[in-house]
Image: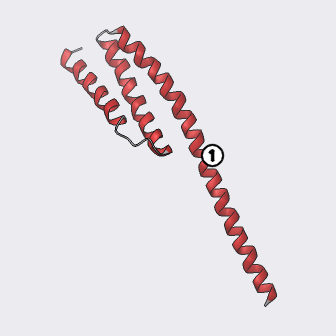
Amino acid sequence: MDPIVIEIIGIVSTVLILFSMLFKTTTLVGDIRMRALNLVGSVVFVVYGALLPAISTAVLNGALVIVNTFHLISLCRQYKKEKQEKNAEKTERLSDKTATATEEKKEN
């Protein structure tokens, strides 16, 4: 493969990982976005390391793919759980309002 193409792949992966570090990770959504972009950057770095060949680069980023995948799955589960809890709270509040309105109608 053309060495310029290989360098472009390396630069793209570097930029992806750099951008992933710019996300605010004080929120769950920020954490998910950071991990997802970091995962993509690591995958591209694995390709870059394999094309050079730079085994240490490929192995390190392969390990980071595993770590980021694990954390991303965990964060997505947490996000889904929190979303379900919020929906349950909304449903409960709505049903409380409906019950109160029904009781008020019965009293009148």
- Find disc 1 in the rendering and name its residue: 81
Picture quarter with the C terminus: bottom right
The percent coordinates of residue 57 (x first, y second) are 35, 14
Secondary structure state at the residue bearing disc 1 = helix
In the depicted structure, whether residue 106 falls above or below residue 71: below
In the image, what residue occupies the spot 79% across and 80% down? 103
Q: Position of residue 107 (x, y in %)?
A: 81, 87
Against 42, residue 100 (above or below) is: below
Quarter holding the N terminus is top left
Q: Position of residue 74 (x, y in %)?
A: 57, 34
Colour mapping? secondary structure
Residue 68 lies left or right of residue 45; in this view the side is right
Quarter of the image for residue 50 reads: top left
Q: Nearer the viewer, residue 7 or 99?
A: 99
Residue found at the very far left of the displayed protein: 4
**Extreme-right residue of the structure:** 107
Label 1 Cα crowd, 10 Å radius (few <14 / some 14-19 / many 20+) = few
The residue located at (64%, 62%) in the rendering is 90
- The residue drawn where x is 71% and y is 68% is 95
- Indicate whether 99 appears above or below 79: below
Q: Which residue occupies the foreground of this view, 53 or 15?
A: 15
Q: Residue at x 42, y 37 (%)?
A: 34
Residue 68 falls left or right of residue 42: right
- Mark 1 belongs to which amino acid? Lys
Percent position of residue 10, x then y: 27, 22
